[in-house]
Image: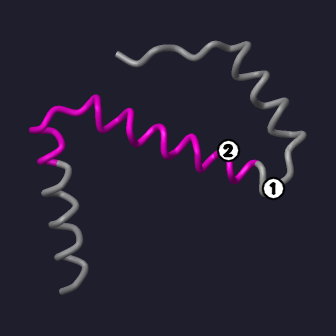
Amino acid sequence: MARRKNPAAVALAKRRMTKMTAKERQEVARAGGLAGGNARAKALTPAERKAIAKKAAAARWERKK
């Protein structure tokens, strides 16, 4: 079950984002994406990872036809 986000933290993050340059926002988003991918990988079971990999491989092969 996903945890709920702290509304105060979300509001603070939005305020900080408005004061950043486009380049700074891009760097923050990239760092968050990298961290999120690792967290997702740790949360998945080997069977779930296998199913995702099979689906991705099928999509790649389908596109080449």
Q: Residue at x 48, y 38 (%)?
A: 35
Q: Is residue 63 left or right of residue 32?
A: left
Point out residue 29 in the picture as x, y percentages from the top left corner: 63, 46
Is residue 11 or residue 39 the one in the foreground?
A: 39
User: Residue 64's x, y, as percent?
Assistant: 22, 84
Q: Which of marks 1 and 2 is nearer the N terminus?
A: 1
Magenta range:
25-51
The vertical placement of 15 against 55, above or below, is above
- Which three-letter amino acid code belongs to the residue tagged 2? Val
Res 28 label: 2
> Residue at the spot x=12%, y=38% of the render?
46
The quarter of the picture where residue 18 lies is top right
Residue type, label 1: Ala
Callout 2 crowding tier (Cα within 10 Å): few <14, some 14–19, many ≥20: few
* 12 or 64, nearer to the observer: 12
Quadrant of the image occupied by residue 31: top right
Is 50 left or right of 16, judged from the image as shown? left
Task: Estimate how packed mark 1 is, as few (under 14), some (14 to 19) or many (20 or more) residues with alpha carbons within 10 Å.
Answer: few
- Please give the residue where the numbered disc 1 appears in the rendered image: 22
Q: Is residue 60 above or below residue 18?
A: below
Circle 1 SS class: helix
Residue furthest out toward the right: 19
